[in-house]
Image: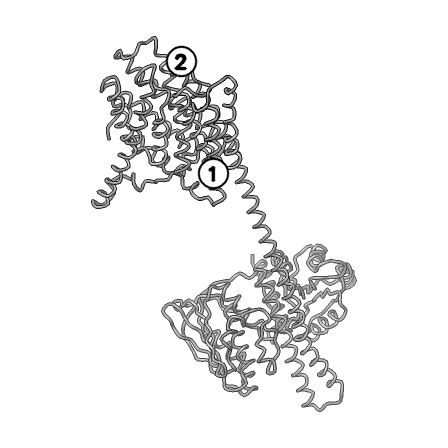
């Protein structure tokens, strides 16, 4: 690229250093670097095409600039090179804003040719062209950097910055360089320098403020689309501007003193455009009025006509600047307000949509809750009803064998109730997000053995065959949660399979292990394969063959597999059975792993001398818990509140070895408070177990934060006994370790 002004300023250097400002930096220019990009980074073929496109753009810009320059110079009167009408400034500024800094050669070449063929010498033409090019490039650079680039007409602040840059920085460059070169070589007298400079400067300012906004706003993609009504209103405002211009400024009407005030009518179409049509139409109306005003003044019409043509044009320029800049400011302010109102309207619509969605979700939640209460009420009443019948049987004289069988049925019904409540608890904890997977590597054989032991008796009682195929594979997952998934899948298969059997096996699939559960049950219809994973869903066709359950087993499976990020697959044929498969990452065989804790042997419990404090506000719970613990050999103290517990301990003069308390006590108190008061009374930390029927996540979090174990009702006696054993064992280990120190 050529360098300008004695080699001190390089337009190419400006482009290279600030290309990101021209094509980025917040501007919304029509043409990006696609046609103006550096040819050196392209293949030869693309480089050639881009070069041709670039050359074509330069020729078009140069031709337009040259034609407007010759027309402007034809109106010069104070000096052949100093004209008050200079639209090329606006064209050059818009070209650099829209197409980038590399358009400067077209501006420079066209300015050289136009000035060299008008007056002066080739040297002065080059100097003038240098000023014209620098004016456009510096103005565009500052607009890109300080005034949002091509979006400079979108806000009042950026319009003010645009006007100041054009007034004070960009346009004085051209006037100063051009007239200095002409005066230096004697083409203009120094005494005429000031008048010529003002004329040159005002011409460039008007070109920048009136012409550049029209080109930029019409070329910017943001302003392309408008509908039929907007098009008709644009035509209307432009027609009004033309009519006002002809009435006030055209030579078609005789100029009289009474006609002079008609020039103020120009404010009407400008206000219309600013308030209704936005910056684009406002700038267009200003250009239409400018053209008619200049034409009228040139031909002797309008209020600005005098004997001196140059003196006539100067007030025309001031008039055009005074109506254009405020109108652009007003239109930008109106545009900002319209956008704010549109943003508020969209926000309101979005808010209404969210409210409607939330309302629908609440309605669905209420419907689901109602369905839950209806189903839970029915399903929970079934085992309770059975328990009542079994208890009634136990009150009658029974033979030893019948009594034993009835007790077994009572225990089986209790376990069914326990399973239902555990399902509700699992769903509650999963929905609350309080479960955190503990990923370890372990052999899948351990879970397969657990399944075999858990369901062997149940399947034999139903006359089903259970086959669990052995696998030596190791997997990476949460052992307890994966066990819960498999237990639910097999339990579901056992519940609904009436004849045939269940097969559980594993198949390696690359780096994954596919654990499959097959059954010969009734199968699942195709349109219900997604629904079965919903909460409380059970297939209607299976109602007559239902066993106990709330329809939560597969919902728990789905939530757990999402928590573990395991994929589950279902294949089923109505009347022939179903196959559930879950994919689990395989692991290399390890020597050690985290294994689930085995239930201790009841015979290993050391209970001699152990004192248990039971706190429960329900007398039946005190009696049941105390009686069971007494049968196990513990010394038991029971109380209904924290105050009663302290009194009971003071009377007995015993320090409890373990506290078992309900989480919720009377008068809004909690078991945590009761435990802490007992600890404070003895000045030490006593092991404690909290028992709660509340499935909400808050009790679990609070107990975990305080370091207590929380069990949910109904608590299996063996589960309670195992937890007590672990607490005593840990407490004894810590005490022994302290004694050893």
- Residue 446 in sight from this viewpoint: yes
Q: Is residue 705 above or below residue 636?
A: above
Q: Residue at x 46, y 27 (%)?
A: 245
For this rendering, which residue is in front, 718 or 291? 291
For mark 1, give the secondary structure.
Answer: helix
Disc 2 or 1, which lies upstream in sequence? Answer: 1
Q: Position of residue 456 (x, y in %)?
A: 53, 82
* Callout 2 secondary element: loop
Name above or below for residue 556 compared with residue 210.
below
- Could you tell whether 248 is left or right of 734 in the image? left
Crowding at mark 2 (Cα within 10 Å: few <14, some 14-19, many 20+):
few
Q: Residue at x 56, y 83 (%)?
A: 458
Q: Dot 1: few (<14), some (14–19), or many (≥20) neighbours within 10 Å?
A: many
Mark 2 or 1: in front is: 2
Hey, which residue is sitting farthest left in the picture? 44
Residue 324 appears in the figure: no
Q: Which residue is mark 2?
A: 307
Is 685 left, or right, of 281 in this rendering? right
The image quadrant of residue 358 is: bottom right
Given contact means CB atoms under 8 Å apart, are the residues at marks 2 and 1 in contact? no
Quickly name the residue at label 1: 234
Say which quarter of the image contains residue 546. bottom right
Q: Residues under labels 2 and 1: Cα distance?
A: 37 Å
Residue lying farthest to the top in this orientation: 191
Q: Position of residue 233 (x, y in %)?
A: 49, 39
Of 648 and 29, which appears nearest the observer?
29
């Amino acid at each position: 690229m050529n360098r300008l002004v004695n080699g001190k300023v390089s337009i190419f250097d400006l482009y290279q250093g600030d290309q990101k400002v021209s094509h980025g930096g917040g501007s919304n220019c029509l043409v990006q670097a696609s046609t103006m990009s550096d040819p050196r980074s392209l293949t030869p073929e693309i480089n050639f095409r881009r070069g041709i496109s670039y050359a074509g753009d330069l020729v078009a810009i140069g031709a337009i600039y040259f034609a407007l320059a010759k027309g402007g110079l034809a109106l010069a009167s104070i000096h052949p090179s100093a004209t008050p009408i200079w639209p090329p400034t606006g064209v050059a500024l818009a070209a650099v804003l829209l197409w980038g800094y590399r358009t400067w050669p077209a501006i420079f070449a066209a300015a050289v040719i136009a000035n060299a063929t008008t007056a002066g010498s080739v040297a002065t033409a080059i100097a003038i062209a240098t000023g014209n090019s620098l004016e456009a490039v510096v103005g565009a650079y500052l607009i890109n950097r300080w005034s949002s680039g091509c979006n400079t007409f979108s806000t009042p602040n950026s319009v003010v910055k645009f006007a100041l840059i054009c007034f004070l920085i960009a346009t004085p460059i051209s006037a100063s360089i051009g007239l200095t070169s002409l005066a230096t070589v004697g083409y203009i007298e120094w005494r005429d320098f000031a008048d010529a400079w003002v004329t040159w400067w005002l011409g460039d300012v008007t070109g920048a403020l009136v012409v550049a906004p029209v080109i930029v706003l019409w070329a910017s993609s943001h302003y392309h689309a408008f509908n039929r009504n907007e098009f008709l209103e644009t035509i209307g405002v432009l027609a009004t501007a033309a009519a006002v211009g002809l009435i006030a400024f055209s030579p078609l009407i005789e100029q009289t003193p009474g006609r002079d005030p008609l020039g103020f009518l120009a404010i009407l179409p400008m206000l219309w455009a600013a308030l209704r049509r936005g910056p684009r139409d406002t700038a267009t109306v200003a250009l239409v009025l400018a053209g008619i005003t200049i034409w009228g003044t040139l031909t002797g019409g309008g209020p600005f006509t005098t004997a001196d043509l140059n003196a006539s044009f100067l007030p025309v320029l001031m008039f055009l600047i005074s109506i254009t800049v405020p109108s652009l400011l007003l239109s930008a302010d109106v545009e900002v307000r319209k956008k704010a109102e549109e943003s508020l309207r969209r926000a309101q619509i979005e808010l209404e949509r969210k409210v409607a969605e939330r309302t629908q979700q609440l309605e669905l939640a209420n419907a689901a809750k109602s369905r839950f209460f209806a189903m839970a009420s029915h399903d929970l009443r079934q085992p309770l009803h059975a328990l009542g019948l079994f208890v009634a049987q136990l009150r009658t004289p029974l033979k030893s064998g019948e009594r034993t069988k009835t007790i077994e049925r009572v225990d089986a019904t209790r376990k069914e109730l326990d399973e239902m409540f555990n399902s509700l608890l699992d769903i509650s904890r999963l929905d609350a997000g309080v479960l955190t997977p503990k990923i370890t590597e372990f052999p899948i054989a351990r879970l397969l053995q657990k399944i075999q032991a858990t369901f062997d008796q149940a399947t034999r009682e139903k006359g089903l065959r259970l086959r669990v195929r052995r696998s030596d594979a190791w997997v990476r997952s949460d052992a307890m949660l994966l066990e819960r998934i498999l237990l639910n899948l097999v339990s579901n298969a056992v519940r609904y399979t009436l004849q045939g059997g269940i097969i559980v096996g594993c198949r390696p699939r690359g780096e994954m292990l596919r654990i499959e559960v097959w059954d010969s049950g009734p199968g699942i219809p195709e349109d219900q394969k997604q629904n079965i994973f919903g909460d409380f869903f059970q297939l209607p066709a299976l109602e007559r063959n239902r066993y106990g359950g709330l329809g939560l087993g597969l919902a728990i499976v789905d939530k757990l597999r999402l928590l573990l990020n395991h994929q589950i697959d279902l294949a089923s044929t109505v009347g022939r059975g179903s196959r559930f498969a879950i994919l689990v990452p395989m692991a290399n065989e390890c020597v050690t792993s985290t294994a689930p804790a085995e239930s201790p042997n009841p015979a290993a419990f050391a209970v001699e001398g152990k004192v248990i404090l039971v706190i429960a506000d329900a007398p039946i719970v005190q009696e049941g818990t105390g009686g069971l613990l007494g049968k196990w050999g513990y010394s038991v103290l029971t109380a209904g509140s924290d105050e009663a517990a302290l009194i009971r301990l003071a009377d007995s003069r015993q320090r409890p070895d373990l506290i078992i308390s309900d989480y919720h006590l009377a008068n809004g108190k909690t078991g945590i408070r009761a435990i802490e008061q007992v600890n404070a009374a003895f000045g030490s930390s006593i092991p404690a177990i909290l028992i709660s029927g509340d499935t909400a996540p808050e009790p679990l979090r609070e107990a975990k934060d305080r370091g207590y174990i929380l069990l949910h009702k109904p608590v299996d006696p063996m589960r309670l006994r195992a937890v007590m054993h672990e607490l005593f064992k840990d407490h004894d280990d810590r005490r022994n370790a302290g004694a050893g120190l």
